[in-house]
Image (cartoon, rainbow, N blue to C red):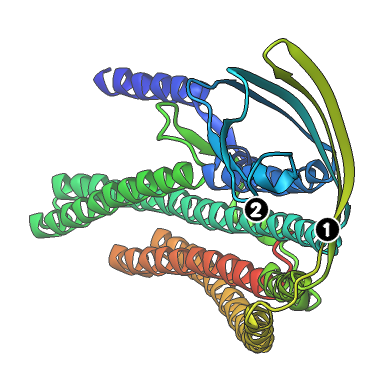
Amino acid sequence: MKKTIIASFILLLAIKTAGIAQNLSLDEAIQRGLDQRNELKGKQVELRLAQGADAKVKAAWRPQVNVNGDFRVNTQLQKSVIPIGQFGNPGVPEDATSTVAFGVPFQNSLGLDITQKVIDPKRNIDRKTNATQVQVRENDLAQQQLNIQYEVTEAYFAALYQSEKLILAQQAVNRAQANVDYYQVRLKDGTSLKNDLDRQRLDLSNAQLSLKKAQQDLELALAKLSYEMGEAQSQTPLQLSDKLGSLLQKTETQLSDQSANRQELKAEMLQMELNELSAQQQLGKLKPTLSAYGNYSLLALNENVSAFNYVGLRLTIPIYDGKAAKLEADEYRLRQQVNQYNIETLKADFNYETRLTEKQMQQARLDLIETQKNIDLARQILETDQFRLKQGAVVPNDVKASEYSLQTAEDNYLSAVYNFLKANLEYRRASGNLGSK
């Protein structure tokens, strides 16, 4: 009766837990990461900033309008010496001078200045630079998305692996408990020794410790998955809806080499383009610029108000800057050479990485096939030994050894599936196919 009550309580607890658990598939986990990771949100803001830079260039080419006001009280007028003798007035010596104060006590002015760029060779370069910067930010965003997809997928595989290891650990505990129950009956019947029962109890204790360790590993793996999805550890437990076996069946292994399209390569190519545009910007400083300007002003001298205005063209032709622009341009051209070397290095790295991960995936597939064969053989041996035990042809220890062999084979197969999925994930990233299944 007591056992029935405990079993009912455990069943009720399991039902309640299952009711509040969050079912989470691999695709849903990836989407959560893409929606919640702050790194991606930061890249999105950087993209918006780059997209707004071109508006600044356009704004600089709109008329620049300023109002200038000067409201002055001359508390003491400035005096000047005038050579009045030079005016030829009768009776005035030629060297005669007179000190005269110029101005009025109240002198106010209000003016409107308008400036409009007409020709500036750097404009097109600036716009091309901004457009390239937008591509850089878009590429950074795509790279961050792939990084998040990789990190969440890796964490999901690890959590799924630990959850299925927990199932195997629970099965091991169940088998050990069954052996303890069996030897307790045999001890009562006098067909077994207490030492045999103690050995089974030791096995049960070890199995329970392994189960506890598996539970802790699963909790850590789920916490890592939550972290990679960009969310705090939830009070609601995660229930992974995918299985390693189902993910294995959906895994695509025949993939074309797309490493030439990897974002890292594109980033270096875009940086090389930016360095070329920067060199052109420096040389553009040596080209003439032309601006139009105009002014309309009111001048008030005491109560006398008068208006004046003017328009003009301002041409600026750089003559000599000490070769500063050329030296800057040469520096950016040298940086382009560095970009080219980096591109060649990345291509070699990605080619090697693709070949290496493909070999690792092939080896993991062979391990997977071999461990599957071992499971089939271990199950066949266990079934045979269980049948022979009923016939009295073998002793219980032989069946127990077969059970351990099956348990080892199941552990090895689970590890092989997990290792193959990880190897496939590494191969997809290296070959530029991370977005595929």
Which residue lies at the image location 54% right of the left edge and 30% below the top edge? Answer: 22
Camera-side residue of 209 and 391: 209
Label 2 is placed on what type of residue?
Gln
Describe residue 349's horizontal placement relative to residue 232 as left or right.
right
Lateral position of residue 169 relative to residue 298, left or right: left
Residue 344 position (above or below residue 224)? below
- Of pointers 2 and 1, the one earlier in the residue sequence: 1
Specify the amino acid type for callout 1. Arg
Q: Return the x and y of residue 397 as percentages of the image width and height.
A: 28, 66
Report which residue position mark 2 lands on: 145
Q: Provide residue 139's location: percent of width, then percent of height.
A: 71, 60
Figure quadrant of residue 402: bottom left
The image's mark for residue 123 is: 1
Task: Say whether marks 2 and 1 touch (CB < 8 Å).
Answer: no
User: What residue is drawn where x is 48% and y is 24%?
Assistant: 76
Quarter occupied by the N terminus? top left
